[in-house]
Image: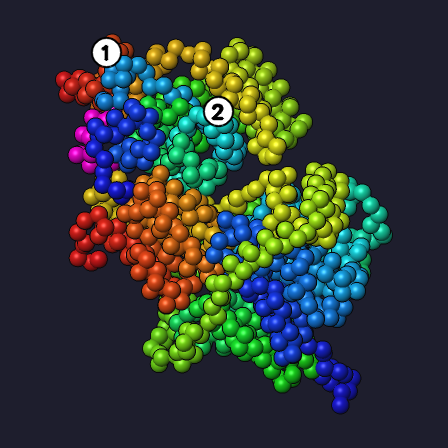
């Protein structure tokens, strides 16, 4: 029993929301998965959308090729959203949607689908990720330029605080910054700067747009901003990071936005723990990493996550199966229901080590925040932040390569028995049925044929009109378009026509050259081969498809440059014919392609075909990404010279391979050391 | 490697037939430093020289330059679209200022230039400056001349304000400098004579409204005070809906029409020969031909029909004494 002096809480805390980031193929299949997950004790939903949905293309668009239903579910219109949520009680559900460029649209579909279920907007609980700056910095699923994107975000927030008051209209993401290589200080600083940019944009919009937003609207806005953070395996420092963020957030609310009520200034966050540190070699070890990372976000009561989703042990191998995700859910349940974690007040209260760590991180973050502020804020500083992230990520890789940073089973203790976990016929991963893409293409065409074309045209016209009028909120027209049967691609296209398209900075140009250490031999070899070729060895690094995870491609591009090559890197989202045209026009000696979204089986052969059509078929192609062994074999059979996966973590060795490949294809003798 | 190398005679013949698809092979050859390839390159240059053609190459050679971040690539995307609408073929030589500290370079320029990959009449090639800040790589000058035989428009895109326009001006028929609203340094550079007066001055980001109008007025006043009434001043915006692009094309065309092309190209060839000679033989070589001025004077006395390799050889003979 608890006494006033007892370290125990009178009542154990309620567990956090337990979710699994899930969704694949089409709405019907994902709905089945969600219902099974809820039966297993999951308490919230976390919807993973496929890349066409995330970037605003219908399944039958050219850019959607190979990506439909791959990394998430395809939602092309209201009918899909209805099927996705079929039989799920939305008045009780708490739904997180990982959606950004098209967040306003998916929220509108959710609102209309809920209304059809008889659930009003003000009953809905959940989160739209809706954070565009980190898309420019890391994740790559942006659609529109920064200005209009910030307006869309501000409009969703302004609409939500009034009409969907229990909804978190934005989740400021530090998660993807860490995945892109951010240090804890960078993760804190850039995400808070990002939040400032959003809050300033909302404040500005509320003051200039039409409509009555009520008293204390900024208090309510501030109170509805939540964060989506990452937690790496250095779990003590990671916990300190969260306490530091809570401190800075409270301060920001008080000082910059004058938020009076303490409850509105509380730092609220959901979390997905680190995927970057998960290994392909000895993948079973990832289970321990995930457990330790979960401690980082649960240990101290005063900075504990509100919602948790954990990755699966096999993410570096491919897409997780339902069983893999269940295994991760069970970890959350053991932590919450078997351990005594929830019975105490904050266990770090008064800890000198923890307070010291927090103080250090806060100080570092403030310094970095003032640098961003000097550049004019987060929107203006995207180039700077991107460059800093690329540099940090490179530093991390360098430490892993030289053994300074130990990764068990990868750069140390690599001796292993064969893992029975990957011995099954499926290789231990989920493979999306290739028929799904065909089905989705046919389904969206049927949908277009069956709706009222006049209503759709009127809705799109109205949307374009509102988009051109800076003083109007885009949400009502978006909700009306959802109801009229407009598709995801049509909604995004209407806005692209008004707002224009955008290519984010790649960050690679800003990365300073590496010290020569470890590169001398590579540089000499590049010089020697270039001399024999007659001109400098030239590499094209390409990212075909909609996959925006560009960290791997960026690191290869920078390292190849540091080794002395001329490198063409055009960023993400290229069609096979764009890549082939660049390769031919630039006269490159080798092409490197990177794909992490699982679309390699369709896109790589398409690039090879396009190279043939451009007359550049003698240029050798190497591929890197999350590529299962079986696929690697068929890619090699199709003409790919080499396939690299996360277990090939030694960049210098990869570059040496590429140099040797160019030499061999051009009839230049290898050196003794090669 | 893109297929077996095409011989110089065939390359020249296809350029003369205005076959734009040989552009990659032309660049591969001109960039090559191997002695055998250089002999081939010379042969190709000779076979596409005005003497061989019987006239100057028909393309409009345009230099587009300006400070980083000013929006040159977005502007170029709009220009490309507009030229294609007018059915003009376009080659872009994007010169990247990336340093070559390690010997390598990251070339990211084409990322921001929007083209239809299926359009054979558009060619974009990136080149590093090989550590020469603001300058042009030797193959870029030669490439501009060679591609001018096959394309309607050849653009050389460089970064910088202050020095780079001078080198571009040696090659291009028309130089357009792009600035953004509020860039007072350009005014200062112009007034102080650090920056040569461009043929066309473009104020980008005209969507910035008042700031853009003020810049336009300031630049107009400055040009007037410098008696540079011939310089066209155009405001453009690349964000939708783009504006000013047609006016810019009209200004570029008007400048081209006003030129004595053969005089301009003759000057360009002589300057290119001098640059090639200097990069091959350095300061010592330059001194041996009487320095920059001495060499220019010497070149001015030579036959107008000589191509660049021939002019370089003359300089080498003179230096060898």
The local crowd at label 2, few if under 14, some if 14 to 19, many if 20 or more residues have their Cα within 10 Å, is few
The local crowd at label 1, few if under 14, some if 14 to 19, many if 20 or more residues have their Cα within 10 Å, is few
Asked whether, in this view, residue A565 is left or right of residue A246, the answer is: left
Indicate the position of residue A47 as horizontal and vertical percent values: 62, 64
Reading the image, the residue beneath label 2 is B86
Q: Secondary structure at mark 2?
A: loop
Residue in the image at 43% along x and 57% along y: A602
Residue in the image at 37% along x and 68% along y: A629
Mark nearer the N terminus (2 vs 1): 2
Image coloring type: rainbow
Q: CA distance from mark 2 to mark 1?
A: 39 Å
The label number, if any, that marks residue B302 in the structure image: 1
Pick the quarter of the image with the N terminus of chain A: bottom right
Q: Nearer the viewer, residue B169 or A112?
A: A112
Residue in the image at 62% along x and 47% along y: A490
Q: Nearer the observer, disc 2 or disc 1?
A: 2
What secondary structure do most residues of the magenta stretch adopt?
helix
């Amino acid at each position: 029993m608890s006494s006033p002096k007892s370290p125990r809480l009178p009542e154990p805390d309620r567990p956090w929301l337990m979710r699994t980031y899930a969704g694949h193929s089409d709405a019907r299949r994902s709905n089945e998965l969600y219902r099974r997950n809820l039966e297993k004790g999951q308490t919230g939903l976390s919807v993973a959308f496929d890349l066409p949905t995330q970037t605003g293309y219908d399944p039958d668009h050219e850019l959607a090729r190979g990506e439909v239903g791959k990394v998430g579910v395809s939602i092309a219109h209201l009918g899909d959203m209805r099927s996705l949520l079929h039989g799920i009680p939305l008045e009780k559900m708490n739904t997180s949607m990982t959606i950004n460029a098209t967040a306003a649209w998916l929220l509108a579909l959710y609102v209309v689908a809920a209304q059809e279920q008889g659930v009003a907007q003000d009953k809905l609980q959940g989160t739209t990720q809706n954070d565009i700056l980190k898309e420019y910095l890391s994740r790559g699923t942006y659609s529109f330029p920064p200005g209009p994107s910030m307006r869309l975000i501000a409009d969703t927030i302004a609409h939500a605080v009034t009409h969907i008051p229990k909804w978190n209209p934005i989740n400021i993401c530090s998660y993807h910054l860490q995945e892109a290589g951010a240090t804890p200080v960078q993760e804190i600083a850039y995400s808070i700067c990002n939040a400032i940019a959003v809050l300033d944009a909302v404040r500005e919009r509320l003051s200039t747009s039409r409509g009555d937003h009520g008293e204390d609207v900024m208090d309510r806005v501030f109170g509805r901003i939540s964060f989506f953070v990452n937690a790496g395996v250095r779990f003590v420092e990671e916990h300190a990071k969260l306490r530091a963020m809570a401190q800075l957030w409270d301060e920001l609310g008080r000082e910059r936005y004058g938020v009076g009520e303490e409850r509105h200034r509380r730092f609220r966050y959901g979390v997905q723990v680190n995927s970057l540190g998960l290994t392909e070699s000895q993948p079973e070890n990832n289970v321990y990493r995930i457990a330790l990372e979960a401690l980082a976000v649960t240990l101290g009561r005063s900075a504990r996550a509100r919602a948790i989703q954990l990755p699966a042990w096999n993410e570096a191998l491919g897409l997780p199966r339902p069983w893999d995700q269940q295994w991760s859910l069970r970890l959350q349940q053991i932590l919450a229901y078997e351990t005594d974690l929830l019975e105490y007040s904050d266990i770090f209260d008064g800890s000198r080590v923890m307070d010291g760590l927090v103080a250090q991180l806060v100080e570092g973050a403030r310094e970095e925040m003032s640098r961003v502020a000097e550049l004019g804020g987060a929107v203006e500083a995207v180039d700077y932040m991107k460059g800093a992230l690329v540099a940090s990520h490179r530093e991390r890789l360098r430490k892993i390569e030289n053994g300074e940073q130990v990764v068990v089973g990868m750069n140390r203790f690599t001796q292993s028995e064969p893992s029975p976990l990957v011995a099954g016929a499926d290789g231990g991963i989920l493979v999306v049925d290739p028929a799904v893409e065909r089905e989705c293409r046919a389904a969206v065409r049927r949908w277009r044929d069956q709706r009222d074309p006049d209503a759709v045209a009127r809705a799109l016209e109205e949307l374009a009109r509102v988009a051109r009028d800076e003083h109007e909120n885009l949400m009502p027209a978006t909700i009306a378009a959802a109801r009229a049967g407009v598709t995801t691609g049509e909604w995004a296209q209407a806005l692209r026509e008004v707002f224009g398209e955008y290519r984010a900075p790649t960050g690679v140009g800003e990365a300073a050259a590496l010290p020569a250490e470890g590169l001398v031999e590579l540089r000499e070899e590049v010089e020697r081969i270039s001399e024999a070729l007659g001109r400098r060895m030239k590499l094209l690094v390409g990212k075909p498809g909609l996959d925006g995870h560009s960290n791997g491609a960026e690191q290869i591009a920078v390292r190849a440059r540091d080794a002395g090559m001329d490198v063409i890197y055009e960023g993400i989202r290229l069609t096979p014919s764009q890549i082939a045209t660049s390769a031919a026009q630039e006269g490159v000696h080798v092409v490197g392609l990177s794909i992490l979204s699982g679309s390699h089986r369709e896109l790589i052969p398409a690039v090879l075909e396009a190279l043939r059509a451009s007359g550049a078929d003698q240029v050798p192609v190497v591929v890197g990404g999350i590529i299962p062994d079986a696929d690697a074999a068929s890619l090699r059979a199709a003409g790919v010279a080499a396939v690299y996966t996360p277990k090939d973590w030694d960049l210098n060795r990869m570059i040496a391979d590429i140099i040797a490949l160019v030499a061999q294809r051009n009839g230049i003798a290898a050196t003794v050391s090669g | 490697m893109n297929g077996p190398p095409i011989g110089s005679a065939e390359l020249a013949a296809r350029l003369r037939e205005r076959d734009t698809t040989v552009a990659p092979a032309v660049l591969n050859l001109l960039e090559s430093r191997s002695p055998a390839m250089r002999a081939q390159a010379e042969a190709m240059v000779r076979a596409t020289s005005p003497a061989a053609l019987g006239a100057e190459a028909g393309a409009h050679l345009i230099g587009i330059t300006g400070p980083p971040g000013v929006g040159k690539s977005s502007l170029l995307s709009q220009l490309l679209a507009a030229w294609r609408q007018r059915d003009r073929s376009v080659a872009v030589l994007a010169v990247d200022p990336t340093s070559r500290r390690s010997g390598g370079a990251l070339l990211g320029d084409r990322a921001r230039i929007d083209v239809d990959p299926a359009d054979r009449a558009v060619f974009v090639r990136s080149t590093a400056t090989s550590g020469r800040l603001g300058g042009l790589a030797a193959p870029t000058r030669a490439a501009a001349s060679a591609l001018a035989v096959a394309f309607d428009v050849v653009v050389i895109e460089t970064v910088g304000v202050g020095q780079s326009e001078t080198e571009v001006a040696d090659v291009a028929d028309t130089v357009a400098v792009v600035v953004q609203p509020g860039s007072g340094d350009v005014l200062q550079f112009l007034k102080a004579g650090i920056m040569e007066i461009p043929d066309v001055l473009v104020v980008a980001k005209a969507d910035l409204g008042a700031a853009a109008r003020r810049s336009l007025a300031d630049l107009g006043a400055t040009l007037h005070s410098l008696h540079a009434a011939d310089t066209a001043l155009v405001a453009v915006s690349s964000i939708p809906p783009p504006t000013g692009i047609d006016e810019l094309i009209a200004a570029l065309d008007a400048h081209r029409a006003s030129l004595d092309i053969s005089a301009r190209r003759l000057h360009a060839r002589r300057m290119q020969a001098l640059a090639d000679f200097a990069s091959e033989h350095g300061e010592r070589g330059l001194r041996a031909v009487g320095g920059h001025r001495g060499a220019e004077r010497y070149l001015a006395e030579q036959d107008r029909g000589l191509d660049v390799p021939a002019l370089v050889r003359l300089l080498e003979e003179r230096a060898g004494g």
